[in-house]
Image (spheres, rainbow, N blue to C red):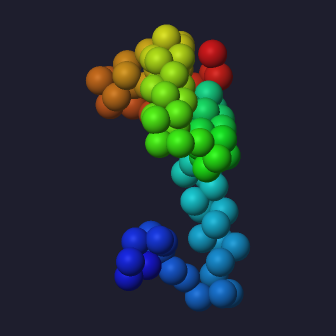
Amino acid sequence: MRIGLANRVVPANELMAAATTMLHTILANGPLAVAYCIESVNRGCDLTLDEALTLEATAFGLLAATDDKREGTQAFLEKRPPRFTGA
């Protein structure tokens, strides 16, 4: 945590509860965005920096055209929780 490799440290007996809370926070986001993030991390580890940046830009471009992006923006403007559909 001191050098930025972790953003939170919890006692071992609180680990599962903390992980479950973090999981629910991640899953509250758009399912397409979460899927592309996971794919980018998994694939990006074996790419050059330029290739990884291209992968990230491609995912961003694809996500920018989704219904979930429009819903997220609209929900933010209306100050309400988004209702993502994965489309």
**Residue in the foreground of this view, choosing between 63 and 71:** 63
Q: Residue at x 64, y 47 (%)?
A: 46
Which quadrant is the C terminus positioned in? top right
In the displayed structure, would residue 71 be above or below residue 82?
above
Q: Residue at x 63, y 81 (%)?
A: 14
Task: Give how far across and how far down residue 65 sits, in percent.
Answer: 49, 11
Answer left or right for 19 relative to 25: right
In the displayed structure, would residue 54 be above or below residue 12?
above
**Residue in the foreground of this view, choosing between 41 and 7:** 41
Indicate the quadrant where residue 31 lies.
top right
**Residue in the foreground of this view, choosing between 34 and 70:** 34
Q: Residue at x 60, y 70 (%)?
A: 18
Task: Give how far across and how far down residue 42 sits, in percent.
Answer: 67, 46
Q: Is residue 75 visible?
A: yes
In this view, the residue farthest toward the left is: 77
Task: Give how far across and how far down residue 85 sits, in percent.
Answer: 63, 21
Q: Residue at x 59, y 42 (%)?
A: 47
Indicate the quadrant where residue 36 lies.
top right
Task: Give how far across and how far down residue 86 sits, in percent.
Answer: 64, 22
Disc count in the image?
0
Which quadrant is the N terminus positioned in? bottom left
Q: Is residue 27 visible?
A: no
In the displayed structure, would residue 81 be above or below residue 66?
below
Answer left or right for 40 relative to 80: right
